Amino acid sequence: MQKKVVIIGAGIAGVQAASSLAGSAEITLVNNEDFLPYYRMRIEEVLCGSDPQALFMHPLEWYEEKGIAIISGNVSGIIPDKMEVSLSDGRSLGYDELVIATGSQANIFPLEGGRKEYYSLRTMKDALSLKAALSKARSLAVIGGGLLGLELAAAVASHFPLSVSVVEVAPYILPRQLDEPSARKLESLLLERGVRVITGAKAKGADDSSLILEDGRRVDADVICFSSGVHADLSLLEGTGIETGRAIKVSDRLRTSVEGIYAIGDAAELDGRTFGLAMHAREMGSFVASVIKGEAGSYVPSVPSAMLKIGGLDVASLGSIEGEAHVYEAGDRRRTIFVKDGIVNGVVLIGEKATPAIKAMLGKPYTE
């Protein structure tokens, strides 16, 4: 008899786990949204007019053909002693193995003043609500100059007749992915595309038309959208005995502290590290399936890389931005190669795609 595997969460990690287990287990994928699983990293496309279905990972028939039972519902609790998952509508799902892939939620912190409505962009429902608000607005302020915040700002600037500002508390945007000169280059290119970037600034308050910074400056903001990081959704774990930190603590086999329960994607914390990239979500989904199937091995996260398009500009960060910087610049393009002990440690690209040849440079001796 096949194992019963319940997967809570239908993002990239959950769907990858289900796909990798297909045919070897009886799989139930619990989806807490009214849409089929979709690519969250493309969510800003909905703001620009794309039909939500264009973002679906697979049609319903794909899940049926693979024997994956995908059900809509909200999980209200996990009962390890009974090996059951409870749904808010009264249903319960028994399992032999449970995979928690509940992802993360946007950080939204309180601001002073009378502002009542704030937005974030994590779900399809968020995108549709934000799109409706933008259609009646004259200005948008995005709090947070990370990957998602910049993609959002650039998408809005290119499709709506609004003034668009990004407020970032760090000295420059994308400090984990870019070196400062590359970040400044990107900031100037974004300004040409209608996105004003304000760095070294912290939001303090808001009224009906402005975001108010700590230094007293006001930023036009009929709409305010938070993109200032995320936190793991741990709301289901009360009473389960599952050990948590910033997320759900897992071993190198992606097992939690409770037998038969695993955590993957944004929900997982391995050796004090949390994960927020699609590449790690896919890896974990595939790896946890191999563990459930009885295969050996330990999960070792790949070296992070970020490749995206912001305002029509290709931006990539590969490897580490530590080492001596070797810069090549022409027009809108800037390539920075980071070399440590004669070896290419990382590459940052602005206005240039990360080709296979560029990726292959990592870990190799540097040559001019």
Image (cartoon, rainbow, N blue to C red):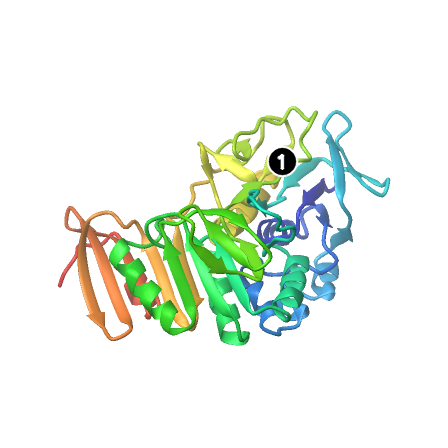
- Say which residue appears at 61% left-offset and 53% top-offset: 118
Q: Residue furthest right?
A: 90
Say which quadrant the C terminus sits in.
Answer: bottom left
Say which quadrant the N terminus sits in.
Answer: top right
As rendered, which of 134 and 73 lies closer to the eye? 134
Can residue 5 be seen here? yes
In the picture, measured across the screen, residue 60 lies left or right of residue 115, that is: right
- Say which residue appears at 85% left-offset and 41% top-offset: 91
Crowding at label 1, few (<14), some or many (≥20) Cα neighbours within 10 Å? some
Q: Position of residue 3 (x, y in %)?
A: 71, 40
Can residue 360 be seen here? no
Quadrant in which residue 173 is drawn: bottom left
SS of the residue under disc 1: loop
Quadrant in which residue 180 is drawn: bottom left
In the picture, measured across the screen, residue 343 lies left or right of residue 152, that is: left
The image shows a total of numbered marks equal to 1
As rendered, which of 171 and 288 lies closer to the eye? 171
Q: Position of residue 293 (x, y in %)?
A: 61, 41
Q: Position of residue 246 (x, y in %)?
A: 52, 34
Q: Position of residue 142 (x, y in %)?
A: 50, 57
Vertical order, 170 against 368 (above or below): above
In the picture, measured across the screen, residue 231 lies left or right of residue 95, that is: left
Name the amino acid, label 1.
Leu
Q: Report which residue position mark 1 lands on.
A: 234
